[in-house]
Amino acid sequence: MSSASIVVHPPSSTGGRRVSVHWRGRDETLGAAFSDHDLVVFLEGAGVQNPDSILDDDRWIEWRGGRARQWSAV
């Protein structure tokens, strides 16, 4: 299990991935991302500084059910 507080869930059959953050003892869904840009916008809104610099950092983001930055179902 990862200690990352941000989870990008598996791609849906129609594309896009749900993004959630564990913060203040609970999980909160930020929305469905369809691109790196969407993910960066969600993370900025959650208060992450320089979010594009952490997209490949597994200490921050856990990519489940697919490769990092893969937005469509295989």
Image (tube, rainbow, N blue to C red):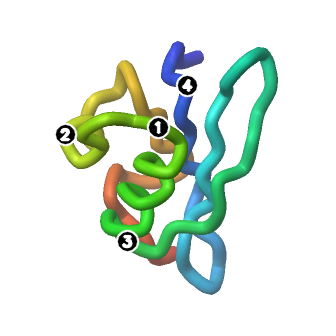
**Which residue lies under the disc numbered 3?**
35
Q: Is residue 38 left or right of residue 18?
A: left
**Which residue lies under the disc numbered 4?**
5
| Marking on residue 47 | 1
Q: Which of the two discs, 1 and 2, sits closer to the camera?
A: 1
Disc 1 on helix, strand or loop? loop
Residue situated furthest left in the rendering: 53
Where residue 58 appears, as percent x and y from the top left, is 35, 27
Which is nearer the eye, 30 or 18?
A: 30
In contact (CB < 8 Å): disc 4 and disc 1: no
What amino acid type is highlighted by mark number 1? Gly
Screen quadrant of the N terminus: top right
**Which residue lies under the disc numbered 2?**
53
In this rendering, does residue 41 appear at all? yes
In contact (CB < 8 Å): disc 1 and disc 3: no
Disc 3 on helix, strand or loop? loop
Q: Is residue 45 left or right of residue 41?
A: right
Q: Which of the two discs, 4 and 1, sits closer to the camera?
A: 1
Q: At 43% across and 34% down in the image, what residue appears? A: 61
Disc 4 on helix, strand or loop? loop
Q: Which of the two discs, 2 and 3, sits closer to the camera?
A: 2
Q: CA distance from mark 1 to mark 2?
A: 14 Å
Q: CA distance from mark 1 to mark 3?
A: 19 Å
